[in-house]
Amino acid sequence: MSASAAVATARGDDGRTVVSRLASAPPLTLRQTGPSTVHLVSTAAGPLGGDRLALDLYVAPRTTLELSSVAATLVLPGEGESELLVTARVGAGATLRFAPEPTVLAAGSRHRLLVRLALEADAYVLWREEIVFGRHGEAPGRCHARFDATRDGLPLLRQEFTVGDPDLDPSPAVYGSARCVGTTFLTAAAKEPAVAEGVAVLPLAGPGTLVSALADDAVRLRSRLEWGERTAVAGEPPDPAAPW
């Protein structure tokens, strides 16, 4: 299956954000749930092996878009590798918060997750990704994730990682006993690196911060990522007593 969906914003005459475009194709179905809020609703199983899915986001200058999902995404096995390509352009002075529910890699699945994020000057972004290593009691499928972010055409963050390699995943230097991995990219710049159990906050060379976390379950993973996000936004060293 091949399917694509798109969201675009515009600035209204009164200065408010208007969702000017909302295009869907199952399993990528979008619903506007607030003035500048859109939720992704899965209307078909997937992605399945062999699926090619694409999501395009455009946030016009000085507008705001928050995109989430109503449930986790379950990646299922099939014939070949599935792919989700997310392309986002964020205009000058615009704000994008991208925080869908986790992606669960069912046993036997093979998936590619590609993100291409282009920012203009003074754009603010929070981009969170969470991956769960299989359903309860099963081994994870395989996923190769690639994230590319630029600001004004210059590289800001290029990152990729693989989940589901049985020779690498159990290594203490990779995921160890963790069952979930997550990252948050923010344009907010943390003043200094910060580390707590299962989470690290790393200021980037450009204006931005990368939060990375591991956990045994999705609830704890979300808690650790949110702690890192608060740390980055506050720009202060974290309280040593983490909330988990």
Image (tube, rainbow, N blue to C red):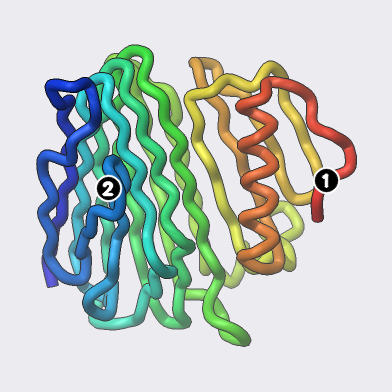
- How many labels were placed on the picture? 2
Residue at left offset 48%, top offset 51%: 129
- Identity of the residue furthest to the front in this view: 14
Q: Check contact, mark 2 vs mark 1: CB within 8 A.
A: no
Residue 176 lies, in percent from the top left, at 73, 63
Q: In this rendered view, identify the residue nearer to me: 41 or 173.
A: 41
- Judging by the rendered image, the residue that carries numbered circle 1 is 242
Q: Is residue 214 left or right of residue 117?
A: right
- Badge 2 marks a residue whose secondary structure is strand
Residue at left offset 57%, top offset 85%: 138
Q: Is residue 237 left or right of residue 146?
A: right
Q: Quadrant of residue 17?
A: top left
Dot 2: within a 10 Å radius of its alpha carbon, few (fewer than 14), some, or many (20 or more) residues? some
Residue 170 visible in the displayed image: no
Q: Is residue 62 above or below residue 36?
A: above
- Judging by the rendered image, the residue that carries numbered circle 2 is 86
Q: Quadrant of residue 9?
A: top left
Viewer-nearest of discs 2 and 1: 1
Q: Mark 2 to mark 1: distance in Å?
A: 32 Å
Residue 130 lies, in percent from the top left, at 51, 56
Q: Quadrant of residue 49?
A: bottom left
- Identity of the residue furthest to the right in this view: 241
Q: In this rendered view, identify the residue nearer to me: 80 or 191.
A: 191
Q: Is residue 119 left or right of residue 174?
A: left
Q: Amino acid at mark 2?
A: Val
